[in-house]
Amino acid sequence: MQLPSPAKLNLFLHITGRREDGYHELQTLFQFIDLCDTLDFALTRNNQITISPIIAQLPTEDNLVYKAAKLLTPYKKDPSFGIDITLTKQLPMGGGIGGGSSNAATALLALNVLWECHLSLAELAKLGVKLGADIPVFVMGFAAFAEGIGEKLQKVELDTPYFLLVKPDCHVSTGQIFTDKYLTRDTPPLRISHALKLGGHNDCLDVVRKHYPDVNEAYLWLKNHGDAKLTGTGACLFLAFDNMHDAERVRLSTPTKWQSWVCRGCNTSPTHDALNQWIEQNRS
Ligand SMILES: C[C@@](CO)(OP(=O)(O)O)[C@H](O)COP(=O)(O)OP(=O)(O)OC[C@H]1O[C@@H](n2ccc(N)nc2=O)[C@H](O)[C@@H]1O
Ligand SMILES: Nc1ncnc2c1ncn2[C@@H]1O[C@H](COP(=O)(O)OP(=O)(O)O)[C@@H](O)[C@H]1O
């Protein structure tokens, strides 16, 4: 089974409070983009979980894909089931586009089928949030207005513009941004109808720009070309366009020291599209 594992954008990210456990209450708008990692799954009968190739500075036990497979182990139909996973990365790590969370969700969705666990999407999302606040939206697979720590999801249908995505040459620590004392944590909560009509901003932007000069520089550069936004806690920034041609034109002038892509917003996760197709083809 081969599945794409897409990135997400936070079209806005408002921090509305802080919980006693230190996690922050958010209101955010998630949309997927068609920029993806790829995961290949081969079912085995040796009760082992393997992931290849080795990723530098990411021991297998720390890989969210491995952790997701471990979480699902108690639900296997046959205890001898194992899995060989090939993870082909394209998404930058620590970019605020949720690559690791997406990979974990893709593993949960694939193994639920291959290991015949028969968990519902809601059950998988509940397991996934133990590994990361961003995992439920990838498990559910629809563009969403999210609250709580990002796990309370309301499905939305959004325009699907082209995006220019730019990755400044740094890796932002989500934990560092959320512990900064100058982070805005009291944005008044909006009703979903207002949030969708008015749009929003990213409360992390100022703190990320302060700590990461490269993000600041890329933000100032992109701002000359439109309404530049930060996704999640960064480092990636994005601009929306009505058509691919305009997005490509700006991308071609983007300083080469920053990685850049043109991609398209999608309201359904490509993982779900591919998994449904696989299930259809393998129905016995
Ligand atoms: C900010 C967001 C927005 O989509 O995205 P990223 O920039 O990471 O992609 C997410 O909420 C990130 O989700 P995720 O990357 O899964 O974070 P987690 O592993 O759960 O948490 C990393 C750390 O960030 C802080 N954290 C995270 C989420 C949240 N709502 N409040 C927090 O305070 C906590 O300190 C936690 O220890
Ligand atoms: N499969 C994975 N892909 C990417 N990062 C992973 C993975 N498994 C664990 N991680 C860890 O999660 C961190 C955050 O990764 P990622 O989700 O890509 O970024 P972000 O949360 O900024 O969007 C990485 O720096 C890495 O240490």
Image: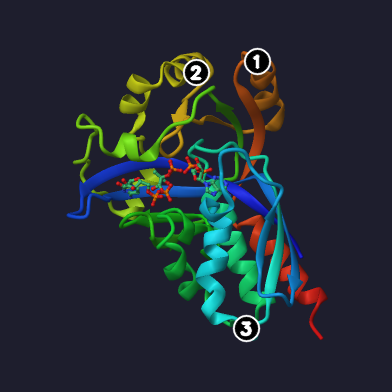
Q: Which residue, given by chain and number where applicable, does mark 3 sit on?
A: 79
- Chain-order first, disc 1 or disc 3: 3
Depth check, front residue: 116 or 198: 116
Mark 1 vs ligand 2: CB below 8 Å: no
Residue at the image position 47 percent from the left and 75 percent from the top? 123
Q: In this view, does 176 lie to the left or right of 53?
A: left
The numbered disc on residue 218 is 2
Disc number lying in front (1 or 3): 3
Find numbered disc 3 in the image and state the secondary structure of the residue it sits on: loop
**Do callouts 1 and 3 mark residues in contact (Cβ within 8 Å)?**
no
Other residues around mark 1 within 10 Å, as few (<14) / some (14–19) / many (≥20): few
| 27 versus 170 height, above or below | below
Q: Is mark 1 on a helix, strand or loop?
A: loop
The numbered mark at residue 256 is 1
* Spatial CA span between label 1 and label 2: 11 Å
Figure quadrant of the N terminus: bottom right
Q: How crowded is mark 2: few (under 14 residues within 10 Å), some or many (20 or more)?
A: many
Q: In this view, does 255 lie above or below 99?
A: above
**Residue 60 image point, x, y percent:** 59, 52
